[in-house]
Amino acid sequence: MKDGKSETDVGNFGRERAVVIGRRQFLAGAAAFLGTGAASTVFPTPAVAKKSVDIRQLYLVQNRTGEMINVVYWADDTYFPDVLSEINFFMRDWRADRHRVMDLRNINTLSAIQQILRTDQPLQLLSGYRTKSTNNLLRNRGLRVAKKSLHIHGKAADIRVRGVSTSTLTRAAKSCRSGGVGRYYGSGFVHVDSGDVRSWSS
C-alpha cells in the first residue's frame, strides 16, 4: 500500500454496491456515440479494443504528479482488489494526500469511455477524489465547484484526452448513460460522475 492516508478502508470496496456497465449497455452506448456522426473521427485502435469485452481496463495519467496507471481491473466477472486499491490511490486528492474507495460505477464509466473513443491516449485525470477542505479551497478561489460535490464522495472525475475534443469526449460520456456529464468549454475538460443521469455545459 502507498503512503497516502485513506479515509475509507480500501478493503471494503467489495461491499460497495456497483452498477456494472455490461456488454449490451456498452455496445448500445458505442452505437449511440457513432450515430452522432463521430464515426468520421478516426482514432487509433488500442490493445484493449482487440481484447474480449469481458476485460475492463483503465489508462490514466495525472499531470499534476506525473503519475500514470494502465491496468486491467476486471475480467470474467471478477474485480481485482489489489488493482482497485491502486486505482483508489491514483485518484486521490493529491493536495491533501488522502484517498478513499472510488465508486465502481464511475471507474466502469471511465473504462467504457476509453473503449468507445478507441484511442490509445490515456485519460488525463484533472480531479478525482477531493477532501472537503480541498473542495472548499477551490470554491474560495472562485472556481465553479459545487458545495456538495460528488468528488467528495469518490463518485466523480474531471477528465480530458489529448487529441480528442471536449465535444467528442462529452458525446462518448453521455452515450454511457451512467450518471452526470458536464462539459466545461473554457477549461477544456469533461466532468463525469455516478449520480443521476443528467448533463450541463459551462
Image (tube, rainbow, N blue to C red):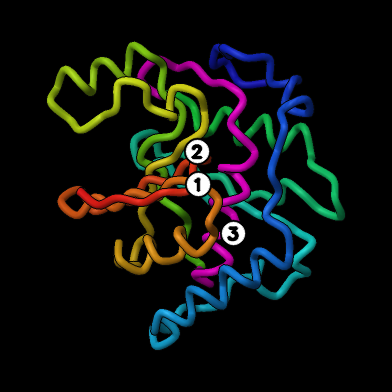
Name which residue type carries label 2: Gly
Q: Residue at x 35, y 62 (%)?
A: 162
Please state the extent of the stretch shown in magenta in the rendering.
94-119
Pointer 2 with pointer 1, Cβ within 8 A:
yes
Marks 2 and 3, the one that precedes in the sequence: 3
Q: Secondary structure at mark 3?
A: helix
On screen, residue 125 above or below 25: above
Check whether the beta carbons of the residues at disc 2 and disc 3 lie within 8 A of each other: no
Residue denoted by label 2 = 195
Image quadrant assignment for residue 8: top right
Q: Which residue is mark 1?
A: 179
Q: Where is mark 3, residue-wise?
A: 112
Distance of label 3 from label 1 (alpha carbons): 13 Å
Q: Are marks 3 and 1 in contact (CB under 8 Å)?
A: no
Side of 69 relative to 159 (left or right) = right
Kindly state the secondary structure of the residue where label 2 is placed.
Answer: loop
| Drawn side of residue 189 relative to residue 7, left or right | left
Q: Is residue 159 left or right of residue 89?
A: left
Residue at the bottom extreme?
Answer: 40
- Give the residue displayed 54% in from the left and 59% down from the top: 176
Q: Nearer the viewer, residue 80 or 102?
A: 102
Is 102 within the magenta?
Answer: yes
Give the label on residue 51, or none: none
Question: Which amino acid does the dot numbered 1 rest on?
Answer: Gly
Location of the N terminus by quadrant is top right
Q: Is residue 139 magenta?
A: no
Q: Amino acid at mark 3?
A: Ala
Task: Tell me if mark 2 has few (under 14), some (14-19) or many (20+) residues whose alpha carbon lies within 10 angstroms of its own.
Answer: some
Name the residue at 39% across, 88% down.
40
Label 2 vs 1, first from the N-terminus: 1
Separation (CA) of disc 2 from disc 1: 5 Å
